[in-house]
Amino acid sequence: MERRQLLKAIGLAGVGAVHLSTPLTGLAKSINMPSAENIKLVNAKNNFNKALQHDARLIGFANMRQEYLSQPLKLEGKLPTDIQGDFYRNGPAGHERGDMRYLHLFEGDGMVQGFHFENGQLTHQAKFVKTSKFIKEQQADKFLYSGPDSRIDNALPVSHPDMVNPANTNVIAVGDELWALWEAGSATALDPRTLDTKHTVNLGQNSHYGDKLKGLAFSAHPKIEASGDIWNFGLSPTGHIALFHLSSAGKVNNVGLINARYKGGMLHDFLITDKHILLILPSLKVDAEQTGFFAQISYSNDIPMQVLVIDKQSLTLKKHYELESGFAFHYGNAWEEADGTIHFDASLYKTNHILTSFQKLMRGQPDDIHIGAKTVLFSLKANGSVHQQVIEGDSEFPRIFASKVGRQNQYLFTLAANDNPIWNDTINCLDLFSGNKSHFSYGKDFLVEEHIPIAMQGAEEQGYLIGTALHIPSKRTCLNIFKADRLNDGPLCRAWLPYHMPLGFHGNFVAS
Amino acid sequence: MKIYSALMFTSSLCLAGSIAAQTLTVEISGIKNDQGKILLQLFDSNENYQSNKAYSANMIKAKKGIVSISFNNLSAGEYAIRYFHDENDNGQLETNLFGMPVEGYGFSNNAKADFGPAAFDDMKVTITDKNLVTHSAVQY
């Protein structure tokens, strides 16, 4: 190789590495941090555990380091025998190591739970996702890496996001594996039977993409069509968004890159219709004056929400809509009519105050979690006009029947916080055809997690709604099964764990 | 200005009786296989590092474990080395779709990338009147 060529070739090292300088800018430089950084984490642990002694509700956010082997659960009521399969959930559970506690709820090590339904019996098990970060920190018995908000003194350097991937947000079935998902790095493959960690997923491996997809952000909210095809996105720190189309076995069919010029720093969810991908960009911007990744994310009324409509076949931008300002973590579904009108729903906030609420919660200072997030039904007309309808009442963790992803759905299931302001306590169902609502309130003694509709026979009318809740007085978690169209009747069956699990985020059911 | 400074520096070294012809050797450890080559660049200032203007470049066949390679005839001053393991031997640092390296790389003084390339100050070594050896472990 000529010297000039060699110089040019290595020069790319700088270009490539420069892109690393912006992701999770809150992590930034962790070398030579003042010791005050450690003190924040030590104080967080002390303050949280002191508050826990007086506020039993905080148990859902307490540190967990124990794993649970599979064991049968005690049932109240009759477990429907037509439910055969596994309900998997994921969420941050390892919030503390040594004398330190993470400063944000989103930073903890992910723990995957599996509820196995077989012949009217239920078993439960739970294991941590053994990411490289988890293994190293477990061996050291202390935090080695700074988190997005939690800076520690003498943190190990981070050369790519997977080095700090906690795999703590969602879990889906892909082929004969489970994938534990984060949103800023790779999926982590697990054994669906044992929940043992297998490997970090390199999406392009054994394809013509090679390592081109290695380490890319792969969001925690893939959309799985009725065909089994998997769609997902990943946000680059440059504001580009990668789009992924995978087979049900995880093989890459197509990958695209959209220059969305998005400067919000965080993008959590997206939607698909039968023809299009919707990238919905909230009214966020990064405030570099603040310290910490989540603290830097600020809301601006001056930034309209944007919807980028992308063709699923070509992965190219087809249309662009501007909405009023807003922010949403989650969307339920999207579908489109023959005339091109696209409908979608959002659990929409008019601020991103919830991000700081999670910080206070981690310090033992619970705040109102639901700051007015409501279901908003949007219609994007082909002529560019936008209509929206606000549904009164709290709304978070929206879910629909899996068979309706990208198609018109009749039912939208959400959570709400009515009597317990630090987490959800109520499940709601909105019939989008009739406008009728039904709900079940667990009451203030329960911290209610995402509930998902499942239809063993494929019909929404014969479906169930299943989900977990933490019973505060008895410090136990329970799994609840409802008839999806009769929430008001309360659960058909409740299965009690003999222990409690930390409050998690998302999960999915895999039929046998 | 830079030439002036360099002349002044060289001049002072001459007054001290030193000859500017030292060798900087980098010992690279943690190479995961024998495939391809290790391609290196040497920088003589932060300015040139930031603008990707290498003072010199070199290469060596990859060998699992440790290799050593030298830059010769260096005058006194601060230097920094960056390199990558060109496993597929195409002369390019392979990156993913977001531009992040997917081949191993490293820096002199065992400086580490930390959500961005290593800083010159962390990578730099100072040549005076002796040969110097710096160590680095590949980051894959």
Image (tube, rainbow, N blue to C red):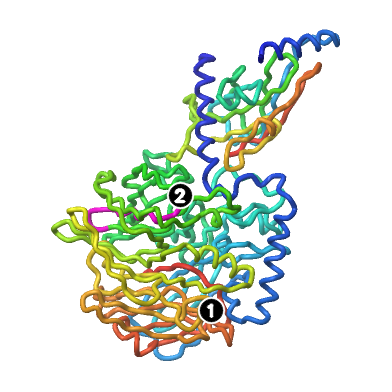
Amino acid type, residue under disc 2 in the picture? Ala
Check the picture and name the quadrant holding the C terminus of chain A. bottom left
Amino acid type, residue under disc 1 in the picture? Gln
Q: Residue furthest right?
A: B16
Q: Residue at x 48, y 33 (%)?
A: B94
Q: Secondary structure at mark 1?
A: strand
The answer to which image quadrant residue A267 occupies is: bottom left
User: Eyeballing the image, is A16 above or below A107?
Assistant: above
User: Eyeballing the image, is A294 above or below A77?
Assistant: above
Q: Secondary structure at mark 2?
A: loop
Q: Residue furthest left?
A: A339
Q: Look at the image and say whether residue A13 sits in the magenta stretch.
A: no
Please name whichever residue, A167 or B4, is drawn nearer the observer in this view of the structure.
B4
User: Eyeballing the image, is B29 above or below A124?
Assistant: above
Q: Percent position (x, y) of residue A320?
A: 27, 49
Is there any visible trace of residue A375 in the rendered image?
Answer: yes
Q: How many marks?
A: 2
Residue beneath disc 2: A217
Residue A71's disc number: 1
The answer to which image quadrant residue A465 occupies is: bottom left
Q: Percent position (x, y) of residue A44?
A: 67, 66
The answer to whether residue A345 is left or right of residue B136 is: left
Q: Which residues are magenta?
A: A273-284
Sequence-earlier tag: 1 or 2: 1
